[in-house]
Structures are given as C-alpha cells and as structure tokens.
Image (spheres, rainbow, N blue to C red):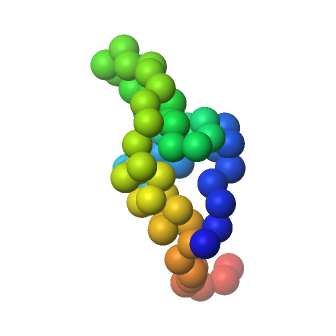
Amino acid sequence: MKELKINKNYGEIFGYDKNKGKEIIYMGGISFRIINREKGIDTVRESQDTYNKIAEYISKTHISMGSAA
C-alpha cells in the first residue's frame, strides 16, 4: 500500500475543489487539515477512516484513457 505524503492536498478524492478554497491536507499520522474557505473552516482533525480511504484510493491502479492529439 502506498504511503500518504505530508502536506499534500488529497481533497479531490472527496470532490473538494482547491480553486474554490476546499482542501484536505495530510499532516502526518491520522491528522488532516480541513479547509473550506466558503464556510470559514480551517481546522485540524484526526480521522482513521479518512486516512484509510485515501490510502486505499492512491494504492489502486489508475488507467487514463483517451485519444492522443
């Protein structure tokens, strides 16, 4: 299983859009910085469940399909 990278934003896995001020940044261990600028949220929380979901997602093989221009 791949390891999460500290200070990396994993928000897009959960549909968060960094351009709209929404991020989930890995802080180490099971800690995440949750940012939602629309709602004025900027907090650090611990979540084993979030860690597990991200670790599982990044460990999957991803295939990008499309036509070459």
Above or below residue 8? Residue 40 is above
Judge from the rendering whether residue 24 lies leftward or rightward of residue 7; answer left or right.
left
User: Residue at 44% of width from left, 36% of height from top?
Assistant: 46
Q: Residue furthest top?
A: 40
Horizontal and vertical percent position of residue 51 = 47, 52
User: Residue at 53% of width from left, 77% of height from top?
Assistant: 60
Look at the image and tell me whether residue 18 can be seen: no
User: Residue at 53% of width from left, 48% of height from top?
Assistant: 10
Quarter in which the N terminus is drawn = bottom right
Horizontal and vertical percent position of residue 21 = 46, 28
Judge from the rendering whether residue 34 lies leftward or rightward of residue 7; answer left or right.
left
The front one of 44 and 60 is 44
Judge from the rendering whether residue 41 lies leftward or rightward of residue 32; answer left or right.
left
Horizontal and vertical percent position of residue 19 = 50, 34
Look at the image and tell me whether residue 5 can be seen: yes
Q: Quadrant of residue 45?
A: top left
